[in-house]
Image: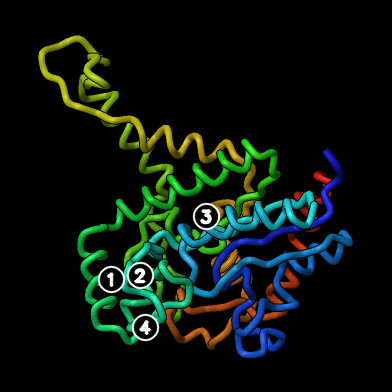
Amino acid sequence: MTKHDSIFTFGCSLSYGADHKSTNNNVRPSDDAYTNIVAKHYNLQHYNFSVNGHSNQDIARQVLIATNIQKEKKLNPIYWIGWTKYKHLGLAHPIGKDKTLQWPYVRVHNELIGNSNNDEIQKWAKDVYRVVDKMSRFVLSANTVLQVNSMCKMKGITVINSFNSATWKTECTPSNYHIQDKMPGREILIEDWFEKYTEEFDKNYNYVINGTKVGKSGKSYKTFDPYLRLLWQEIKQFKWFEWGADDLGFQMWCRDNNLDMYPEKNQNISTWHPDEKAHHAAAKKIINSNTIGELL
């Protein structure tokens, strides 16, 4: 295997560098996007596949496309993946042609605010969100992380995972997204929830896995599928860059370190985009961690 010669970045607006001056009103990724700064530090080529508003499913599509670009250009990149909010969804829709940016794929979450101006697509998007609930969207994102990393491992591609926005790692209430005079509260980490969920079964119930009785002896048995716990354990084994102790993502790290964002901090946190100085601070953190350096 030849030496790594480039960084491929994947993510949403947070790794795109949305609202930066160099984006020319968000026409192109920012020159000050944190991974671009890191690439320059190590004298590596940089390709930013991030797109404003992308879901984790969209990121997975970009990764697969990038593997072919990598082959064509004969590069040996490090893939930096900034996973985004699990509430975002990217799904295919047959009538999206000429109405959506990346037909046949539709950013379902964007249609809730009417991006396409197409009544049929917007109605479909609302129906999707009624059916695909919070936990289902989380499982979709978790499966996507597993699938992308497994594919890259099979292809011999080095991946560093990170959270751009880690709201999908926590169970957040709507009020947590709004800043008043105090920092938003933080709810139970999903990984902690998994452990408690599993302990509850182990402690109080006999259970059945694939028809086999497991647990204490007794007459009462409950069906228990350990997939979610095993899924999270599998995901944690991949290589991750952690932004902090709880690792709530790049966006929250910027907030916790009082770094400036666009727009002003009186709006919904999910709309905040770290400014150029914040991206430079993030790049410095990555460089100081030697996460990239140790791979070169």
Q: Residue at x 41, y 42 (%)?
A: 192
The residue that disc 2 covers is 108
The residue that disc 4 covers is 116
Q: Are marks 3 and 4 in contact (CB under 8 Å)?
A: no
Compared with 3, 216 (above or below) is above
Compared with 121, 43 (above or below) is above
User: Which x, y percent locates residue 139?
Assistant: 36, 48
* Numbered label attached to residue 125: 1
The residue that disc 3 covers is 60
Q: Earlier in the sequence, mark 2 or mark 1?
A: 2
Q: Earlier in the sequence, mark 3 or mark 4?
A: 3
Q: Quadrant of the N terminus?
A: top right
Disc 4 crowd, CA 10 A, few/some/many (<14, 14-19, 20+):
some
Q: Residue at x 60, y 68 (%)?
A: 50
Q: Earlier in the sequence, mark 1 or mark 3?
A: 3
Asked which quadrant contains residue 112, the reply is bottom left
Instruction: Single out the residue that lies furthest toward the top.
Output: 217
Q: Earlier in the sequence, mark 4 or mark 2?
A: 2
Q: Secondary structure at mark 3?
A: helix
Q: Are marks 1 and 4 in contact (CB under 8 Å)?
A: no
* Numbered label attached to residue 200: none
Give the amino acid at mark 2. Answer: Val
